[in-house]
Amino acid sequence: MIVVMKRNASAEDIDHIVKNIEELGLKAVTIQGTERIVVAAVGEERVAGINSLESSPGVDEVLPILAPYKLASLELKPEPSTVHAGSLTVGNGQIGVIAGPCSVESEDQLMETAHAVKKSGASALRGGAFKPRTSPYSFQGLKEEGLKLLAEAREQTGLAIVTEVVSPDDVELVAEYADVMQIGARNMQNYRLLEAVGRCPRPALLKRGPSATVDEWLLAAEYILDGGNENVMLCERGIRTYEAHTRFTLPLASVPYVKAKTHLPIVIDPSHGTGHTYMVPALARAAIAAGADGLIVEVHRNPDKALSDGYQSMTHEQFEEMMGKCRRIAGAVDRSLGSEG
Amino acid sequence: MIVVMKRNASAEDIDHIVKNIEELGLKAVTIQGTERIVVAAVGEERVAGINSLESSPGVDEVLPILAPYKLASLELKPEPSTVHAGSLTVGNGQIGVIAGPCSVESEDQLMETAHAVKKSGASALRGGAFKPRTSPYSFQGLKEEGLKLLAEAREQTGLAIVTEVVSPDDVELVAEYADVMQIGARNMQNYRLLEAVGRCPRPALLKRGPSATVDEWLLAAEYILDGGNENVMLCERGIRTYEAHTRFTLPLASVPYVKAKTHLPIVIDPSHGTGHTYMVPALARAAIAAGADGLIVEVHRNPDKALSDGYQSMTHEQFEEMMGKCRRIAGAVDRSLGSEG
Amino acid sequence: MIVVMKRNASAEDIDHIVKNIEELGLKAVTIQGTERIVVAAVGEERVAGINSLESSPGVDEVLPILAPYKLASLELKPEPSTVHAGSLTVGNGQIGVIAGPCSVESEDQLMETAHAVKKSGASALRGGAFKPRTSPYSFQGLKEEGLKLLAEAREQTGLAIVTEVVSPDDVELVAEYADVMQIGARNMQNYRLLEAVGRCPRPALLKRGPSATVDEWLLAAEYILDGGNENVMLCERGIRTYEAHTRFTLPLASVPYVKAKTHLPIVIDPSHGTGHTYMVPALARAAIAAGADGLIVEVHRNPDKALSDGYQSMTHEQFEEMMGKCRRIAGAVDRSLGSEG
Amino acid sequence: MIVVMKRNASAEDIDHIVKNIEELGLKAVTIQGTERIVVAAVGEERVAGINSLESSPGVDEVLPILAPYKLASLELKPEPSTVHAGSLTVGNGQIGVIAGPCSVESEDQLMETAHAVKKSGASALRGGAFKPRTSPYSFQGLKEEGLKLLAEAREQTGLAIVTEVVSPDDVELVAEYADVMQIGARNMQNYRLLEAVGRCPRPALLKRGPSATVDEWLLAAEYILDGGNENVMLCERGIRTYEAHTRFTLPLASVPYVKAKTHLPIVIDPSHGTGHTYMVPALARAAIAAGADGLIVEVHRNPDKALSDGYQSMTHEQFEEMMGKCRRIAGAVDRSLGSEG
């Protein structure tokens, strides 16, 4: 950590900050610049209270040097991780494709889409049973009944099941039916939930919060890893910006950045990342070209009748066509897409 | 809701959208423009699946007309609400001031600050016992022990207690000790928690999520109101923007906007809203001048030793001085600040 | 345009707004909803003063229906446009690649890079002679001397020259040497400059301003088109968001969006769009996969000695490698990249 | 400047960066941390090419220490500056109020408003003659004819004239008529214009660009100061964020921040900063409470007929009422507002 002093900081201020740094167990190195003094705090800077140093007299700014996460970092584990969950493989040259409806609405609806996405080469089935909805007046999901339908769809198609868990109390129940525990964007900093998923034997898909920095996202992953669950997939689904013609802005630079910082695989969600069906194929192709390890996309047999997210869901035919194009891009980056065998 | 058709939409597309609108129980009115056709969907537009209309063929855009919330709206209850919780009154010309440390760290620390803020005119004491921390390596709070210290501080000072609850499972426990249940920014869309607080007899202070729209924030309030808890205070604490010299950007336009849309009182948090102690007094004064119904500020006896948020905490002396200046501004807008009697 | 009235709007308010709409030459259609009245203003809504309707009594909101631009719209010209400028073709299945240094620094530097990018298959050479620099203490460019060197590089390599013009007074001079007039992000709303380039016979490359909406960007293009210059290429170079590990956030959803709205080709700038050399290849590949018509990238023989933008410049070797990979992606979307012959 | 090396940086990388730093004329100090090496570059870091150091091998990140501006900094001139221009004083406890229409539309319109704002206590008259308009189809201003009307209004009321200049070529002409040269948000980084205003004898009002950082804004001011014009007023008018119910987000934290960094006075524009007339008074009061040195507001005799910006313009009566309330806030912070004598 680098502490930048104000131009008019006194010798007493310097002594004070040096003492504060040493009390936190770090070593202080003072550098006299031409205009200002900076004090480097050398050592483990991930300690409680370190940010409060900014309040010491004469301090202008405090600049962290070390990444705030450890277990997620590439420095700790230099080889990329691969996550396996039933039919789904994410990482190691294999691009996993998770597809299915936003919400499980009925047996009929789910089975039809499950078979369709399987046929087009998806590696796993998505579907929400517990839905976190912005409005209390929106469809809230079929809950356990939905989980049972998902398990039935796995039975019929062999596809691994990816579904969201919204509360620590539900983790055990969801883990009974699901292959992958999805943590939604709104719950990225629901630390109790992260801790519960950290203790759970199922792999986790951790969506980025729409205003989370990548550091905050990786710290959320750190909670899960720290709980003992080593199978964490990151999922970029877009951030909130002033751009209004898309629901969110999908920053594909997250792919190279995350790969430079962490060993965790990264999945891209072009459905939420754009919010409009017609944009999904272009961003899905782009994600693969950028080096993403997976895709998660919303598919519905009848988007204009969907109980949720119809505006960003693809029909079965659109998904089939997109998969063909994505497979060509995967080939051009020497990777395989979905279940190609 | 207004459905804007594409320029080349066919008669069949129009028929289809009209049918879809009618199936949702609304009436469709078609307007032939010079360049495009728009179809107005007249009726209750807060129904599941309505946004999926965007997926109908020939549709360019769907524009909502009605606010998505009802119970929170000024249209339903045209008089501003006032919230009372022990020594704290927020609304009706009374500007409540909630002050205290970010975290309860020790008995000694809490009592000293409790007495100090009481003396300077605060209306309530804040202090975190359950802390949602970005990093698993940060101080996580004293939990129930912290709640007991807060209750003891109320005993000694008469100040109402405002403290955060982070999980539905803790609502009952926190409600035993606290006067106001604070829902933090990271949990604004933790719907299970909102529902639990909705069933709880204590008033709620609902912080805005850092990337939430005001509509999403009011919909979160709607979850609490819908559960039967009518005592909801909104708390604006800043949004995430590209601005990097403040921790968040504090949009004071939220005050007039919220007052034009809802009857709920609004509290401003200039500590999180700026992230730097030296900026807090200016923004506190501005909040009052803008018409806010309350303030929540972080105060610590020794900010540069605080276990959390020291960089945005005021000393007791700084708080005392700020209160004097805020009182003058309150007078200039014909309101009273804190416990002035 | 749709005018949404407040719930309590009076009959008089309705009459007033209807009159105001008619005075602007539009037809007013009143729709009685269950909760509110909306008034549709039918006709040409691109008229001076129309936004001021929001100030009429009883009005809650004004929602535009028509795109604010005309000449740029796909509705006016339904076929995609292709731009040709010497060796550069952008559009019609041909992905143009514009490469070269941020600034022209010296003859030696420019020629070396010009030959290198030509060899790797670039279609045009970029290089700044007039530099708009954030700081008055930064390198400001070689000005006309730089233009002459660029012309000399064209002479030697056959590559078309793309260079920035920063002032209406320089348009004539720059047009003497350049094949494409680049309008930088900071000047996207420098309307005098847009008008001057609109009157100029050279194609224009119009960068998006870092906080411009796509509508504002297309309106800037409209200024150029309206001046008579039909050869406008859009260039997405990233928007400003809270994301701090990239210089800007590159929204590749601009590609499908722009293609759905306008006939103008779109070029992506992954150098400014990320601000870090190591991210450029991933985003360049992604741009092509998303359907972009061109790339513009910064290449320098010695990035860590560059007088500007070294942190986002590629070496000649990195560019060569990137081109190979981009060519494979281009093939996978059935397009050709750069000068492949 | 602090150069953070990657964990695996080699001794050769360290030597290389040290050499690069020394070639730029700075001194390199190497600090061996527990996890990484950082190299401090001591000396004048405002030199061309310094940011390119990030491209040196083994470098992870480059953190600037010194502010990039000099003449604008409080370190160079520790006392706040006051700007005088005819009837307008901004700074030194005097809050200047600049009011008037967005555009000069006609003699009648301008004179009526000039007299009205004068009567309510405004210190200066604003009015646009050269209008930078987003759309080529919007009203573009009366140009020199508008300047003449502004001079006539000064004649009649004694109010100083604040008007925008949009092109370097117009600086001389505008300076003939105006007392203050306004540089609009869209032109904040039009460096030719900044240079021209820097050579002009009239004070400048420099609006912040909607996506400019404060550093970029102060560097724009630096261009003007560097040209010899010492009378620069900063004007915060809001930044672009995801917030959609206001036109821009007005960050009042700019007031304490700017005052901690620079001697230049700061004026707030609550009209553009909110984009809705009904929000203007709340934000105007807040600006004064936060410590702003001035206000600039749009006033029109008939907002719903205004040729531009009617939705954010106040009527004469609304302005009169707002001034009364603002005067009380000014008193509560021991300052005087407008022409109170």
Image (spheres, coloured by chain):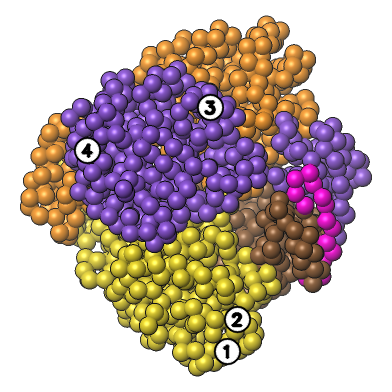
Chain colours: A purple, B orange, C yellow, D brown
Q: Amino acid at mark 4?
A: His
Q: Are marks 1 and 4 in contact (CB under 8 Å)?
A: no
Q: Nearer the viewer, residue D164 or C99?
A: C99
Which numbered tag is attached to residue C104?
2
Which residue is painted at 78% across and 29% down in the image? Answer: B305
Which residue is painted at 75% across and 45% down in the image? Answer: D35
Dot in front, 1 or 4: 4
Respond whether the residues carrying marks 1 and 4 are from the same subunit: no
Dot in front, 3 or 2: 3
Q: Amino acid at mark 3?
A: Gly
Q: Are marks 1 and 3 in contact (CB under 8 Å)?
A: no
Which residue in the protein does label 1 denote?
Answer: C149
Q: Nearer the viewer, residue C156 or C63?
A: C156
Which residue in the protein does label 4 denote?
Answer: A115
Q: Position of residue C181 (x, y in %)?
A: 45, 80
Image quadrant in which the N terminus of chain D is located: bottom right
| Placement of B175 over or under D50, stated as above or below | above
Q: Nearer the viewer, residue A175 or D341?
A: A175
Quadrant in the picture for residue D262: bottom right
Q: Nearer the viewer, residue A148 or C83?
A: A148
Dot in front, 1 or 3: 3
Q: Earlier in the sequence, mark 3 or mark 4?
A: 4
Image mark 4: chain: A
